[in-house]
């Protein structure tokens, strides 16, 4: 039985392309509803990680309960679920949206609709969400709200007249948005008498309380003391506390149908409360889990190694700690001839990888080398067996290989029509296969290509941005695997093969890649006391060679009484700088060199 | 009177005195230098007060070297310079043959002054010739010209100085190899017993650094620096001036003994604005420098503000006007020994782990090792800073 239990609840989310003003709008909503006193207000309140604030992105989902008395005189409970805004976190977004009945779609009045906007709208529509379009940043001189209104109508198919005009930064149109949430987002439906079904849309680890599970109660209710079961993992726990976010965690007697809040149940590991899983009662389980759960699989893999090999245990502990909060990060020990012991890590995407690396270095004070990211290939052996290879080093001997299959994806690219030619060229260069071209409002084109995932994760996005002067946007979805003529490209530095620089490339492009990578490495490896040859090879055959010439003159001219303290301190600083480099044979290779493959098309 | 052998005081046999005044500040100079002589009298008084204070605390030490550097000491009234040496002689004993050097610029050198310096007790003059090329002198912001530079050498020699050093600068933008070679040849022909040839170093905080950063002046060309370094080694060596330190050349026995103290990690007192000193750890208590456990030596320094210095020397408390100090640990001392000693042709004593770390560099002909010593080859000297970075543990 589905019934409207609480018609004063509205669960909604804000969706937007990156930089379109989602976090700023959330801040204004919190302010206007008095959820956060003005004096406690800080920018991007819901983005609690330092990294989120600094980079202006949302990595973890957040939820907050706001109380709002609408113009109809009635008090409402508005639950805002803030979602990650990046393509790497598409699944997490989908679960957060599944916890809502409505979505505020923020579109930048100067930028219009972008690929990520569309992807999020598609997700919201899949979940039958009521979408309230908001044209943000109307105070900017370059704003063209009418064009954006038309785009909303023509590209998304929503009535443009329903779009609200706002400037989150200036506080314009905020009440109208709250009123629209009350008036247009339907109240939650569900059966309060049915067995508990609560959707997990995020979880975070708290050092004192264990895992805090973010839930939306779909049916039934949950109170402290009850024994719960996670339906996918089949793990059971006793609930210690339930509550809501105001925005700090505030305990309540229980959470009932339609409500959004948290539960704490002495859960030690976020892996036991997977995003998308359904929480039910152990004694009275629901018949079926909520739809949409899937186990998250990494898209890209890279090795992470400590520069100082003594730090490997610390790195392991740091990864374990990050894992407490980030179940999507997977890793296993890896040994590299060049880099020593480290960990092969799987990430949702490049942004996720960058975030993990940055957090490891920052929060755990580690100096790390991250090798170039790679996708996971499938290798069909002559024996007929198919194995997964997420590390070029693990590629079996060519004689044992029947074929190598690479992951492919469908990429949707939105680009102003003036730049469509150059973007199509880029897709061709990246071995893309044309699928579709559609003209859209605002003189824009939607391109669809079938592309190797391996090409997308390299510098595709940067190239796309630079060739379109920042206007193009990208969304992609993994579609499957396809056999291609792939080979392993090896790099030798100072005559010694550096396994961490190996990569899997297409045979036709191996020479070009080899040349560019060698050239790039020559620029990144500083001059040393000796000449350093850099070679690229495929199957033992050298295809490119560059040389870092030996250092010519490096000697302080004057060194007298007063200089000695300074000179010794300078020496100590330089030694510290050297510790940021990895010594391979007799060559010191800086961190950046291991990421060279990512910037091969630069300069 | 305490035992002069106590606390290693007898290990201190050198004294540096700083005179900050200059006619004008050179574009590349990062030593403490003040244009004009406005506060000369009070500064020299303060300097003498510090010398007196040191002597009172340390007892009458015997000195092998005294060096009056700057700034431009020659710019100061010769009587006042004489007064400074009088003060030194009052508080310290000068060992027989003590080397007493004065830094001088050609523009403040004359027959009369040179005679006065000799009379005051100086026995060595280091002349800041820098270049004989008008455009290069202009680039460096020097006030003298070629003729004055050459005349100054004659003046000090005629006054009776037998120990003369000439300072030169190379790798100055605009200075080509041929002109550098002819500068070296001309200077060598004057017959000084000592020449210093420095690559132009653009130090942060100098007017030159600012000009280069703004793009108003070109940066030093490293290839020219390398070629001109080699030219200096060849030309000066051919004239009997052997390279005994990266940038210093001398006839046998004419090496600057004062500077050798620095490079051999010897001890010295530093007096005056911006001056640094190096003391045995045991001496710290005598000069109110804290000595943490584990210290094997002390380095201390003065501030760079003239009014503050003068004030502190004057306040009558008897406290030395030292701004800061650091304790040198055993590891720090070893790093210093390597980074200073490898600058010298004589190299450093070597054994144990240092020898092991040096092995590959010896094999690559960047270092030589013989008779228990380790030194830089000509090739190694050109990249000495990197060699040192690899050697220091």
Image (cartoon, coloured by chain):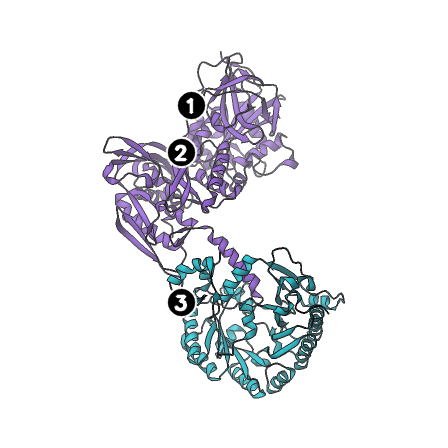
Chain colours: A purple, B cyan
- The image's mark for residue B77 is none
Report the Cα–Cα distance between label 3 and label 2: 52 Å
Residue A419 is situated, as x and y percent measured from the top left of the image, at: 36, 44
- For disc 2, the chain is A
Which of the 4 image quadrants contains residue A420?
top left
Do the residues bearing badges 1 and 3 touch, measured as CB atoms within 8 Å? no
Vertical placement of residue A533 versus B216, above or below: above
| Residue A32 image offset from top left, x and y in percent | 61, 31
Q: Quadrant of the N terminus of chain B?
A: bottom right
Q: Report the residue marked by disc 3.
A: B379
Q: Are marks 2 and 1 in contact (CB under 8 Å)?
A: no
The residue wearing badge 2 is A298
Q: Position of residue A56 (x, y in %)?
A: 52, 40
Instruction: Kindly report which numbered mark, 1 or 3, lies closer to the viewer in this rendering.
Output: 3
Vertical position of residue B393 compared to residue A503: above or below: below
Number of marks: 3
Q: Identify residue for label 1.
A: A292
């Amino acid at each position: 039985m589905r019934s409207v239990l609480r018609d004063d609840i509205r669960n909604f989310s804000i969706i937007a392309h990156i930089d379109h003003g989602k976090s700023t709008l959330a801040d204004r909503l919190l302010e206007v509803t008095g959820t956060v006193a003005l004096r406690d207000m800080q920018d991007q309140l819901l983005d609690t990680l330092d990294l989120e604030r600094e980079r202006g992105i949302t990595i973890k989902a957040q939820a907050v309960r706001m109380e709002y008395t609408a113009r109809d005189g009635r008090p409402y409970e508005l639950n805002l679920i803030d979602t990650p805004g990046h393509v790497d976190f598409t699944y997490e977004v989908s679960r957060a949206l599944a916890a809502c009945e409505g979505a505020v779609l923020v579109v930048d009045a100067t930028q219009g609709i972008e690929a990520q906007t569309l992807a999020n709208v598609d997700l919201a529509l899949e979940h039958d969400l009521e979408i309230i379009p908001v044209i943000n940043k109307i105070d900017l001189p370059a704003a063209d709200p009418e064009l954006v209104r038309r785009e909303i109508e023509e590209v998304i198919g929503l009535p443009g007249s329903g779009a609200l005009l706002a400037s989150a930064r200036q506080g314009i149109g905020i009440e109208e948005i709250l009123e629209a949430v009350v008036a247009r987002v339907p109240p939650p439906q569900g059966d309060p008498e049915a067995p508990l079904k609560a959707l997990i849309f995020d979880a975070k680890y708290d050092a004192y309380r264990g895992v805090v599970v973010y839930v939306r109660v779909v049916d039934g209710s949950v109170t402290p003391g009850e024994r719960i079961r996670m339906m996918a993992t089949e793990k059971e726990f006793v609930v210690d506390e339930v509550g809501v976010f105001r925005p700090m965690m505030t305990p309540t007697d229980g959470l009932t149908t339609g409500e959004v809040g948290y539960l704490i149940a002495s859960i030690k590991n976020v892996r036991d409360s997977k995003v998308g899983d359904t929480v039910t009662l152990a004694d009275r389980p629901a018949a079926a889990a909520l739809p949409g759960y899937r186990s998250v699989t990494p898209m890209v893999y890279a090795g992470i190694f400590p520069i100082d090999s003594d730090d490997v245990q610390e790195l392991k502990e740091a990864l374990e700690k990050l894992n407490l909060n980030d179940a999507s990060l997977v890793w296993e020990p890896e040994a590299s001839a060049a880099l020593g012991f480290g960990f092969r890590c799987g990430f949702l995407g490049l942004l996720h990888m960058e975030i993990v690396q940055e957090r490891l270095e920052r929060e755990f004070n580690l100096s790390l080398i991250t090798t170039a990211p790679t996708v996971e290939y499938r290798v069909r052996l002559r024996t007929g067996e198919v194995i997964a290879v997420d590390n070029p080093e693990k590629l079996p001997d060519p004689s044992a290989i029947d074929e190598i299959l690479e992951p492919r994806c469908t990429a949707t690219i939105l680009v102003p029509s003036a730049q469509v030619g150059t973007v199509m060229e880029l897709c061709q260069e990246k071995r893309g296969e044309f699928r579709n071209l559609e003209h859209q409002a605002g003189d824009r084109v939607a391109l669809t290509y079938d592309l190797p995932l391996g090409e997308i994760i390299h510098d595709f996005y940067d190239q796309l941005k630079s060739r379109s002067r920042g206007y193009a946007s990208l969304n992609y979805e993994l579609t499957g695997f396809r056999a291609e003529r792939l080979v392993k490209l090896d790099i030798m530095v100072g005559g010694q093969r550096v396994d961490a620089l190996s990569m899997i490339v297409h045979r036709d492009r191996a020479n070009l890649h080899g040349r560019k990578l060698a050239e790039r490495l020559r620029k990144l490896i500083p001059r040393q006391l000796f000449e350093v040859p850099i070679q690229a090879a495929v199957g033992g055959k050298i295809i490119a060679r560059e040389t870092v010439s030996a250092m010519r003159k490096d000697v302080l001219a004057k060194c007298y009484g007063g200089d000695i303290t300074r000179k010794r301190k300078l020496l100590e600083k330089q030694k510290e700088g050297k510790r940021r480099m990895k010594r391979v044979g007799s060559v010191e290779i800086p961190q950046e060199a291991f990421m060279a493959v990512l910037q091969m098309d630069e300069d | 009177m305490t035992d002069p052998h106590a606390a290693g005081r007898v290990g201190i046999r050198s004294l540096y005195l700083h005179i900050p005044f200059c006619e004008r500040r050179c574009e590349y100079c990062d030593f403490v230098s003040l244009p004009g002589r406005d506060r000369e009298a009070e500064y020299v008084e303060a300097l003498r007060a510090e010398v007196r204070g040191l002597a009172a605390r340390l007892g009458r030490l015997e000195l092998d070297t005294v060096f009056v550097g700057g700034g431009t000491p020659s710019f100061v009234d010769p009587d006042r310079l004489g007064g400074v040496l009088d003060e030194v002689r009052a508080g310290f004993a000068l060992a027989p043959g003590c080397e007493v050097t004065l830094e001088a610029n050609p523009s403040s050198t004359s027959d009369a002054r040179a005679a006065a310096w000799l009379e005051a007790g100086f026995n060595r003059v280091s002349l800041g010739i820098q270049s004989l090329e008008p455009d290069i002198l202009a680039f460096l912001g020097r006030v003298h010209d070629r003729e004055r530079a050459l005349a100054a050498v004659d003046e000090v020699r005629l006054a009776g100085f037998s120990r003369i050093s000439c300072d030169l600068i190379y790798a100055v933008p605009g200075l080509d190899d041929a002109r550098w070679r002819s500068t070296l040849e001309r200077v060598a022909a004057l017959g000084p017993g000592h020449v210093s040839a420095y690559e132009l170093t653009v130090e942060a905080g100098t007017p030159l650094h600012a000009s280069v950063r703004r793009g108003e002046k070109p940066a030093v060309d490293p290839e020219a620096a390398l070629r001109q370094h080699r030219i200096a080694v060849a030309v000066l060596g051919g004239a009997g001036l052997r390279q005994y330190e990266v940038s210093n050349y001398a006839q046998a026995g004419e090496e600057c003994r004062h500077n050798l103290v620095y490079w051999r990690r010897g001890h010295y007192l530093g007096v005056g604005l911006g001056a640094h000193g190096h003391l045995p750890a045991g001496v710290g208590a005598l000069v109110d420098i804290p000595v943490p456990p584990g210290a094997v030596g002390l380095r201390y320094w003065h501030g760079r503000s003239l009014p503050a210095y003068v004030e502190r020397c004057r306040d009558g408390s008897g406290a030395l006007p030292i701004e800061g100090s650091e304790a040198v640990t055993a590891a720090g001392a070893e790093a210093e020994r390597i980074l200073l000693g490898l600058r010298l042709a004589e190299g450093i004593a070597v054994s144990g782990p240092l020898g092991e770390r040096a092995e590959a560099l010896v094999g690559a002909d960047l270092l030589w090792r013989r008779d228990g010593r380790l030194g830089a080859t000509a090739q190694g000297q050109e990249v000495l800073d990197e060699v040192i970075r690899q050697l220091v543990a």
